[in-house]
Structure formats: structure tokens, C-alpha cells
Amino acid sequence: MIGIVVVSHSEKLAQGVLELAAQMTRGAVPMQAVGGIDDPDNPIGTDPMQVLAAIEAVDAQADDGVLVLMDLGSALLSAETALDFLDEAVRAKVLLCSAPVVEGTVAAAVQASVGASLAQASAEARAALGVKIAQLAPLTGEAPEAPSPAAAPAPAAGPEQTLSLHIANKNGLHARPAAALVATAGRFAADIVVRRGEAAASAKSINQVALLGIKRGDDIVIAAAGPDREEALAAIAALHADHFGERDEDVAEAPAAPAVAIQPAGDGVLTGAPASAGQAVGPAHVHRPSLPEITRRETDAPAREVARLDVALAQARAELEALSHRAVRASDKAAAGIFEVHALLLGDDDLRRAAIGRIEAEKVEAAYAWNAVMEETAAAYRKLSDGYMQARAADVLDSGTRVLRLLTGETAAPIRLARPSILVVGELSPSEAAGLDPALVLGIAAETGGATAHAAILARSLGIPAVVGLGEGLRTVAQGQMLVLDGQAGTVLTDPDEAACRAAEAQRRAWTAAREAARSKSAAPAATCDGTVVPVMANIGGPADAARALTSGADGVGLFRTEFLFLERQDAPSEDEQYAAYVAAAEAMAGRPVIIRTLDIGGDKPVPYLDTPREDNPFLGQRGARLCLARPALLRTQLRALWRAASGRDIWIMYPMISDVAELRAVLAAQEAARRELVAEGVETPAKVKTGIMIEVPAAAAMADKLAGLCDFVSIGTNDLTQYVMAADRGNPAVAHLCDSLHPAVLRLIARTCEAGAAAGIEVGMCGELAGEAKATPLLLGLGLVELSMSAGLVPEVKEAVRGADLAACRALAQKALACDTAGEVRALLGF
């Protein structure tokens, strides 16, 4: 990647330009700003030595060269002078760019973030002024001369290697798993192709992958050619083993429903697809926004139109990334994931090249060319036989319309409700759904769309009842007309009488009251019938999830997965950054215990900056505590942050993938060394923090009596424990049936661990998926578990299960389960 240096007479101006460019690229590009001189009375000016230092600093991070952009006058002279002081090898990789500093920096940063060369980024920067000239052309009559965009990189040459995969995802490779595949493939130089039967697609194009229509049960082949083909296939194999990131979905998706309209069931009743449960009674708010009006207009400056398109695409991606970040801060992972998919759609170079091809071949304006490509792509999705994939057409049009509005200058009419109403739309876009206020939107009735559309997923996450695919009959609904919507049955009454409204309103109130009662009750401690209190805690992936955990009634955090702080970035998080994240989570939980697991990462979750070697079987390789012990600096930084955060807060430390006593003693020694180091520096730390381990390796379960004596608590991770005990990868359909945490072999190791914990006088909890199975709660309590941790949304249900349990009966149930021969017998015993 190349880096960028911005030189200005004003330090504030230089920093502002840098901040703008960083927002457009999410900080992915190495950049430095240089401005002003060290003279308090006259700070405006430039210093060649400052420019020299900035170039050298960026060059140390950027292997492919440094682009320097300057504002005017002495900035140019200072940059030229700095070149004279550079080593010849560095000077050969530095290019001074004549582009306007603001527009040019933004354009160059965007190109750099996608791997453009120094020459390509410079050309885009110089062309950036053409966009402004084009916008003002009606007033000035001036036409820009912009260089053509850089050509797409040639496919990698060399022998081809293949990887055969069986797709087990319930909805196949729809938008999100396809996005995960594209993002993974994009990290490698190899030319990577996905084959399904006779059809083939570039693995680096989300639309090509999605349009293959890969469904659950399909067999596909990944072919890679290029120098890093083996590493690429290994990374894709690991992604496949993780179900393309869909293993721990926070928002449950409804069964796939057709995206086509369903005919009315009778007079006054429209029937569609249930999309989000619940009832709603209220007046209709009809929202039918107009799309930007696109007409065919020819141009005599196609290069200018290409430049305009590139800027609009970059700005649209930046908007979507900002929306995604806002959703993450609001603990709305569903919205964040969808906006990330939309950003990836707009980053698909196939779409860009298709639009540029039309601009150059037909000599038409960017808006017309882009609109044509969007319509063709959406139409291709609609032709697919799978209803889930048909629903992706809405994502293409939603993200594409964002670009059109930027090109045309038209703004979308926002959805504004003056009073609580049922929103009536043709088709709700994800962007619109994410901005809805549940206090005003009583329900959603949509003419088209499917229950698996992203807007429907967002409606469910917001708790708004919704029915989609209601058909053209919905067009007869007038503004303010009274409606009764049933999100469970998938019906809308368009002409309800007073009795029907009263009955539906009573039903709605009962539903709302039951939901609110469950939420309010979940905050209370969960005690068994005989009075034993069982802490029911939540698993989180970051500080933003802590608020959701508290709202769900969690008694604390049973697992803070810190690896999410380390993923999708260019370097490891600093001690201060980690400290801030741990403190934020603890503060959000308002004094409740927060169990923070140290970094659990390895060959199955490759992190570029760790430069971990490729392993034939990463699940049996250097991961979890093993990796951290092999990277003492990494572990030391995390432990220092944890000790600092634990001062005055109820933070516990937990180590993953411990397999023997020696490993445990090693991490405990590192933990104490970090504490002593901080004390020597005068940093306040507690004298002790509760420390425990994950029991997820059969060896740890077998040695539980020895390990428990060195811990304050242990927590059983059933996900990995089950796979290791059964020697079965749940991502492999051929053996997935064996990977059942209720198998008696797994239950016996859980019981053994609980016995060891009780003998040592320490708590034994569980933070694997089994902990969230309410039907299994009596069995788990009977085996001896004293704390359960799960996804936040499952806390109320599990608390109810605890309240209905009697420990004596639970123990008897556990003995019956341990005597079973198969997981099927255990499930039958529990009533699954």
C-alpha cells in the first residue's frame, strides 16, 4: 500500500484534510499531516525538515511509496527541499502531486485503500478537481480534462489449486456470507474463482458470487492461481469452517419467504409474508418516495463522468461505513452488518467497470450509466429461483440509489411520522428501516419484499411488527386509513369495523404487556424453587454489547470475547485502547462482574499483523493461550490493560485453550509479572483479580481436579469441547450430526469438571451455546453448574427456566442423562 503526506501552511488545515481522508478510508491508509512552523508569533508557513520527517515516517509504514500533496507557495518548495535530504532509495518512491490538496488527498486516499499504485493514486488525485469543475460547469462553462481511471489488475498467473466445499448455511451464500468470502479473498493477490457447476465467478466480486445462486446443500469449488494461492485457500477453508461468520447470529432470521406479492385472501384482508411478530392497530402513514429522475444525456467529456462516479462511490461508501459504525455503537449488529454489505456492494469493481464501460462506449453521463447497471444487476437477482436471493435485489437498489442521489444532487424524502401509525410502503429499504423509531412506527406493511430481506431483519431487531409481500392491493390504502396488522399471521385488515379494532387492540396490549413483563422480570435474580440463586450472564464481543446485556437482565458478563478488538485492523490495539474498552464494558454493567477472556485467536482466525504461520489444522495448532505465550509482548500488553481496568471494578480474567498445568502456571506467572511491573511504575492495581480458565480441551476436563486448585473459577466452553470430544467439525455436514453438546460423552466431562470444581471450592460456569438452551437448563443445574452465560437475547428465557427448576429433581434428571447411550436419547429425555 502507498502512504500520503499532506503539507500546508496551516497545521489546522493539514490536520483537517487528514481527518477527512481518514473518515473516507476508516484509517486504512498510512498518512501524516505537516503544517505551520515553530514560531508562536507567526505560525503560518512550512518547514522542510518537518516534511522530511513525515515522509520518512509514512515510508516506514507504506511499502509502495509516498504521495505528497501540498497547498501552495513555500509548501511546494519545502517538499522539493525535503526530497534532497532523503536517501536515494526512499526518494525513488516519493511522488509530489500537483492535485488540489483537499479534493486530491481524499481521492488519493480512497484509491490507496484499495491497493492503487503511486501513479494511479496521483492520477485520481489530479482528476479530483474535475468533479468540482463539472458541478459548477453550468455557471462557469468550464469543462475539466480528467485522466482515465487505472485499469483493473491482471489475473495472477501460475498453476491452479482447488478447494471443494459443501455449503451448510441455511440460506446459502446470501449477502453476508458472500461478503465475508469476498473480503477474505480480497486479502490475497491470487486470482480466486468460485465454481458452481458450469458457472463461475470472481471470488473478489460480491455480485458475481451472489448471482451464482449458491444454496444450502450445494457443492462448490474454489480455484486459486497465484503466489499465495495456498494461503488464500487455507483462509477460505477456515472461513467455511466458521460458517462464513454466521455461526453466532444475534438476530434470528425467519424462514425464507417469496419476495413476490401474495394475493389477497378476501375482501378487506390482505395476506402476505409474516416478517416480524406482533400486532398493531392504527392509522396508515403512506410513504411513497420518488426515485431520482434519470434521463439519458450524452456527454463530450466521459473522463469527467468517470471521475464524478468515482467520487460518488467513495462518498456513498463513507456514508455507509459511518452508518455501520453508528449501529455498532448502538449495539445493533444486524444493522451494522447490512450496511457493511451495502458498502461492499459499492466497492465491487465489476459494477464500477460496467458503468465506466457504458460511459465510455455510449458517451453518456455517469448517473444514466450507473442506473442502468443497477437495474440490470437487480433484475439478475430477481431471476434467481431462491426467494432469499431474490430479496437481495432490494440491497442492490438501495445502495445504488444512494450513489444516484449523490450524482444528481437529489435528496431522499425522509420518513416522518407526526403520530404513532402503521407505515405503508412499496418496499422498505434497509437504510430506511434502520432509521425508524419504534415509538412512532406501530407496524410496517410492505407491498413487496420477503421475510428474509434485510429490512425485515431490521424490523425484527427493532421489535416492530411487520408484514411484507402484501401485493398491489396495498396501493388502495389511503393516508390515515385505519388498519389492523398481525405480524404473526401475515395479514392486514384494510377495512376493520369497530369490534375488530377493539379486539385487535386488546390483543396488541396483551402482547405488549407480556413482552414488557418478561423484560422487567428478567432484571430480577433467577432462583430455583428451593431458593438457590443462579447468576445468568451474557456473552459479549465488545463494550457496545454490554448495554444490551444489561437491558436483557444479565447478572453480569460471563464472556467478553476480546478477539474482536484485534480483528479487521492493521496493528494490535494499544494498552490504552484495550484499557478503555474494558473499562467501558465494566462501567456499562454497573458493578456487576465482567469476565474478560484473553485473546483467543489462531490459525482459524488469521490476523495479518501477527504473521502467524499457516497450519494444516489450525484447530489443533497454536491458538488461544498457546499463541499468547508464544507472543509474550502481546500477552503483556493485554494483561497490563486488564490489571489497570480491574482497579475499583469487578473484572475477572479468563484464559482460553488451557490444556495442562504447565500452561496455566505460565500465564499466571505472566499475569503476576504484569502486575508487579505496573506497581513499580506507580500505577494503581488491585492486589488480586479473580482468575479462571476455559474448559474446552478434553485434556483440561480430564485434569480438572489439578487445574481447579490453581483457579478461582472455571467456565466450560461447550462449542470447542464438543468438537474435540467427538472429533467432529460441526462445519462439516458429513459429521455435523455427531457434534451435539448433549452427547453423554460431553455431559460426562461436564459432570467431572463440576465435581472437581466443587471439591476445590470454586465456581463452575458455562459460556458455550448449550448454556442458552432453556430446555437444557434443568440438566445443566443437575450436573453441578452454578452460573450460565449466553447471548443477551436468551437471558430472560433461561432465567424463567431456572425459576421453574428444583435442584433435587435436576440432579435426578442429570443421572438419567448420563446413563443414556446417545445424544438423541438425551434430547428425548429433555423434551426437545
Image (tube, rainbow, N blue to C red):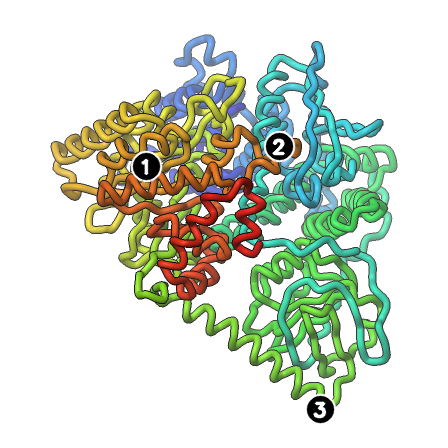
Q: Nearer the viewer, mark 2 or mark 3?
A: 2
Q: Is residue 510 above or below residue 303?
A: below
Asked if residue 544 can be seen in this view, the reply is no
| Disc 1 to disc 2, C-alpha distance | 28 Å
Looking at the rendered structure, the kind of residue marked 1 is Ile
Q: Is residue 498 above or below residue 281?
A: below
Looking at the rendered structure, the kind of residue marked 3 is Glu
Looking at the rendered structure, the kind of residue marked 2 is Val
| Disc 3 to disc 1, C-alpha distance | 61 Å
Q: Nearer the viewer, residue 569 or 454?
A: 454
Residue under circle 3? 498
Quick check: 1 left or right of 305?
Answer: left
Q: Earlier in the sequence, mark 1 or mark 2?
A: 1
Q: Nearer the viewer, mark 1 or mark 2?
A: 2
Q: Nearer the viewer, residue 512 or 449?
A: 512
Asked if residue 195 can be seen in this view, the reply is yes
